[in-house]
Image (cartoon, rainbow, N blue to C red):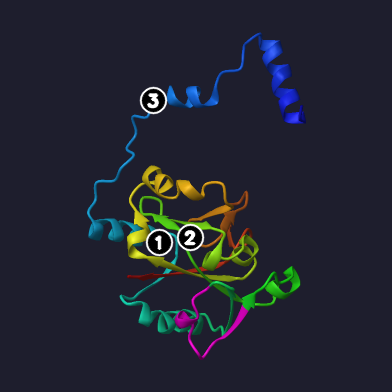
């Protein structure tokens, strides 16, 4: 018996109740909330962009994958950066030749901290909350790569944008056991005096490149 099981068993004994089946308990929860979005493709993207702007996210829009190198170079140039991290699985055809990229082959933290930006893809995005979902595998990089650099450039295909969170979670359910990070704008927090500070828990700057 683990410590968790021991504590829960003690609580059940004190309350004199029997443990219920988790799946059955979940099935009995009323799910009257909206689970599938109703917006069309264009309206859904406009909704997503509106949320990104509200969160002070920089947005670059392109159509073809061939435009991605230029968009990535633009994002880095606008931030005054000439170096970035990428996962080993990131498509080489998307990288601009004018930028120096450091490939992550299990880099130590000390080497990650010295690079100002990271470029990744994503798994999905939620228009209603302006949230980007990363499943940490492949070109989406390890979690540490997406937290330490000051600038995160994230590539989001337009067909990866869903309207609501429930339908997004259904779409990525097959990868639910993998490490997942959700991002809603640049990292920011406020102290007791409501002074907003960026970059406390992650990148201070977020650029979304919409393509496809």
Which residue appears at 30% of the width and 75% of the height? 63
Q: Quadrant of the C terminus?
A: bottom left
Which residue appears at 57% of the width and 67% of the height? 204
Q: CA distance from mark 2 to mark 1?
A: 7 Å
Q: Earlier in the sequence, mark 2 or mark 1?
A: 1
| Residue holding disc 1 | 52
Which residue appears at 56% of the width and 18% of the height? 20
Q: Earlier in the sequence, mark 3 or mark 2?
A: 3
Q: Earlier in the sequence, mark 1 or mark 3?
A: 3
Residue 80 % position (x, y): 54, 84
Residue 189 % position (x, y): 58, 55
Q: Quadrant of the N terminus?
A: top right
Left or right, 135 with reference to 17: left
Label 3: state its secondary structure: loop
Quarter holding residue 83: bottom right
Where are the magenta residues, as a range? Answer: 90-102
Task: Say if mark 2 contacts mark 1, CB within 8 Å.
Answer: yes
| Residue holding disc 2 | 185
- From this view, report whether residue 88 is shown above or below residue 128: below
Q: Pick whichever, 24 or 35, lies toward us.
A: 24
- From this view, report whether residue 27 is shown above or below residue 182: above
| Residue holding disc 3 | 30
Asked if residue 59 lies in the magenta stretch, the reply is no
Q: Residues within 10 Å of mark 2 (few under 14, many from 20)?
A: many
Q: Pick whichever, 194 or 126, lies toward us.
A: 126
Asked if residue 94 lies in the magenta stretch, the reply is yes
């Amino acid at each position: 018996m683990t410590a968790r099981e021991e504590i829960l068993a003690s609580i059940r004994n004190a309350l004199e109740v029997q443990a219920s089946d988790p799946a059955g308990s979940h099935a009995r929860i009323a799910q009257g909330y909206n689970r599938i979005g109703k917006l069309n493709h264009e309206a859904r993207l406009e909704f997503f962009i509106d949320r990104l702007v509200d969160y002070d996210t920089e947005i670059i829009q392109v159509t073809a994958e061939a435009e991605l190198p230029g968009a990535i170079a633009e994002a880095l140039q606008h931030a005054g950066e000439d170096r970035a991290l990428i996962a080993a699985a990131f498509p080489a055809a998307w990288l601009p030749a004018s930028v120096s990229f450091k490939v992550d082959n299990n880099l130590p933290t000390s080497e990650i901290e010295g690079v100002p930006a990271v470029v990744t893809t994503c798994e999905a995005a939620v228009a209603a909350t302006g949230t980007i979902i990363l499943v940490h595998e492949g070109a989406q990089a390890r979690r540490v790569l997406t937290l330490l650099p000051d600038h995160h450039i994230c590539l989001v295909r337009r067909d990866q944008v869903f309207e609501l969170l429930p339908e997004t979670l259904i779409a990525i359910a097959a990868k639910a056991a993998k490490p997942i990070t959700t991002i809603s704008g640049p990292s920011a927090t406020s102290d007791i005096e409501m002074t907003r500070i960026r970059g406390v828990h992650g990148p201070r700057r977020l650029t979304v490149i919409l393509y496809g």
